[in-house]
Image (cartoon, rainbow, N blue to C red):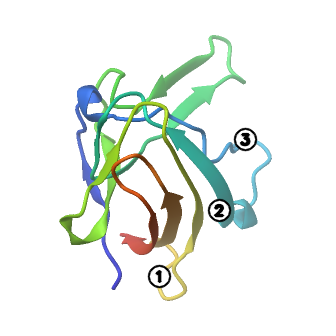
Amino acid sequence: AIKEPVVDVVDAKAIVTDSVPILHLDILTCTKEDLSFHVPFKLTAARNDFIHGLVAYFECAFTQVHKPIGFSTAPFCQYTHWKQTLFYLPDDDPITVCQHEEMVGELICHPNKKNNRDLDIQISFTFSGQYHKHCEKKIDYRLR
């Protein structure tokens, strides 16, 4: 089943892992084709806790101007109206992680074929830790 991500504010204290970049785009040189991508990722737990979902945000820098400026929509930065995007795990089944344990996965994103303003996003990952012995998930999302 396709799930819809939630755009909302995430408290920085709710972030359990490190943050990793997924995609870098240069607005001066990017093409329409760059908006479809397939990226591996590895997240490392910063503390013992539960992972209920993954959080996405973006950072933006305008450097080709007289006075460069930028901002971040990260949970640990000043609030913006863009908020964050939450990709909740299915079945209300959080993953129990211990500090330094790793989640390894990939994110595939492309415009929806019927409405190119929507994004079809697939997140797949594996995790094996002290309390959550083996977990392998592949989740399809549609961001409208």
Disc 2 or 1, which lies upstream in sequence?
A: 2
Mark 2: which amino acid? Leu
Relative placement, left or right, of 34 versus 16 is right
Cβ–Cβ under 8 Å for marks 2 and 1? no
How many numbered marks appear?
Answer: 3
- The location of residue 130, given as percent across then percent down, is 40, 46
Mark 3: which amino acid? Asp
Q: Nearer the viewer, residue 120 or 66?
A: 120
Q: Nearer the viewer, residue 54 or 130?
A: 130
Could you tell me which secondary element the residue under label 1 belongs to?
Answer: loop
Q: Residue at x 35, y 28 (%)?
A: 47
User: Mark 2 highlights which residue?
Assistant: 35
Residue 12: which disc?
Answer: none
Q: Nearer the viewer, residue 110 or 29?
A: 110
Relative placement, left or right, of 101 versus 143 is right
Q: Nearer the viewer, residue 45 or 85?
A: 45
Give the vertical position of 96 relative to 126 (above or below): above
Tell me the distance, in whole angstroms, between the alpha carbons under discs 2 and 1.
14 Å
User: The C terminus is located in which quarter?
Assistant: bottom left
Q: Quadrant of residue 5?
A: bottom left
Could you tell me which secondary element the residue under label 3 belongs to?
Answer: loop
Tell me the distance, in whole angstroms, between the alpha carbons under discs 1 and 3.
24 Å
Q: Residue at x 75, y 59 (%)?
A: 31
Farthest residue, direction left: 92
Could you tell me which secondary element the residue under label 2 belongs to?
Answer: helix
Residue 115: which disc?
Answer: 1
User: Mark 3 highlights which residue?
Assistant: 26
Relative placement, left or right, of 119 versus 55 is right
Disc 3 or 2, which lies upstream in sequence?
A: 3
- The location of residue 3, given as percent across then percent down, is 31, 74
Farthest residue, direction right: 29
